[in-house]
Amino acid sequence: MIPVNEPFIGAKEMEYVSECLRSGWISSAGKYLESFEQAWASYCGMRYGIAVSNGTTALQIAVACVGLEPGDEVIMPTFTIISCAQAVTYNGGVPVLVDSDPHTWCMDTSQLAAKITPHTRAIMPVHIYGHPVDMDPVFSLAEQHGLLVIEDAAEAHGAEYLSGRATANEVWRRCGSLGDISIFSFYANKLVTTGEGGMVLTNDPKIAERARSLRNLCFRSERRFYHTELGHNFRLTNLQAAIGLAQIERMPETIRKKRWIGETYTRRLEHIPAITLPVEEPWARQVYWMYALVLDEGTGLEAVDFAKLLRDEGIETRPFFLGMHEQPVFINQGMFRGEKYPVAERIARQGLYLPSGLTLTEAQLDEVCQAVEKILL
């Protein structure tokens, strides 16, 4: 079975972890943790990095730093992982949804303005499968209405966005540098992995201080076991950070491999009329976190059927996200009732992604393409 993803762990990761073990600093403090935070923040173009236990906790802390009041709203795509909506509801807020752009599968920014109300506090763009959201409209609306931008870059390590295209100040910026607060996941299938892990990035020292406190049970600096508010144990370990630091050092090579995988899949599959392949808009440099495709309904297949046929050929896949408005847990709470988002609904039903990990070989990629052709041609 060709796995949908397999992380690449090299000699440098082994070296750093061994050194970490010898030092005895294996918990949530140590030089690797500090170096990892600084290195990733710097790579992304942000001042402060706060490493946490995973991407979900990064979102939870990021939303907590906004300071939502009951009933405050955060606009986000319906097509995303449940962690985004959960972070808002956990912090007492209300997720407000928009549909997907039919080309990039990211949030349709043309729908944002109609969703803004007096209760809106933030917009949460989510870069999907390695392709950036079109952020200029997000910036414009956020500035106009005094909103914060919480950027979910969990799937877009190293991806870039051409900002300021309508001005003389256009500049390429890395994902993760585009929000007031941004978050990353370092799960095993990400371009940078620590096994489990995440990070909150910001340029605001007050937000950084708040995030560090929430990460660490809100201990007070002047009296450690004295608490005036409740926080969380969302700490990352020095051991995990040692792996992550080695992975950051290899980012150029990692991006080259990911782009090779994406471009090779596209070249090999673009002749098949029954599938829609990922795009790369002129204002984006995407990293193909996962190589995704959407089946045409004319095939008579849905993604779940296609996945079973590929599995019979020895190919592992993963389905697309199910929209937040179709999640039973939220429907049962009375949320999103009657809401329809046709693009997200279609791609959730018809979409899946193919093996895309950093250990994928050319021979394996050929085998995947041959299996897709066998089924669809």
Image: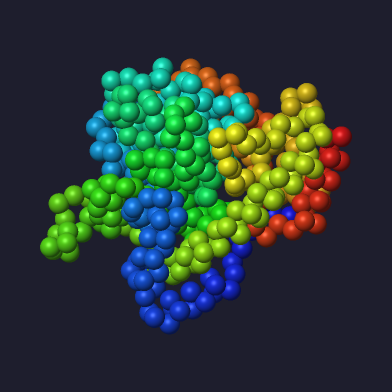
Q: Is residue 311 left or right of residue 291?
A: right
Position of residue 200 measured from the top left corner of the image (x, y, whole percent): 37, 50
Q: Is residue 352 left or right of residue 1?
A: left
Which residue lies most toward the left here?
222
Name the image quarter holding the C terminus: top right
166 above or below 126?
A: above
Position of residue 163 measured from the top left corner of the image (x, y, whole percent): 46, 36
Name the image quarter holding the N terminus: bottom right
Q: How is the image coloured?
A: rainbow
| Res. 92 visible in picture | yes
Residue at figure coordinates x 86%, y 41% from the top left: 374
| Res. 53 visible in picture | no
Which residue lies most toward the bottom here?
22
118 above or below 154?
A: above
Residue at figure coordinates x 68%, y 60% from the top left: 359
367 or 285: nearer the viewer: 285
Position of residue 251 measured from the top left corner of the image (x, y, whole percent): 55, 58
Position of residue 181 measured from the top left corner of the image (x, y, whole percent): 35, 43
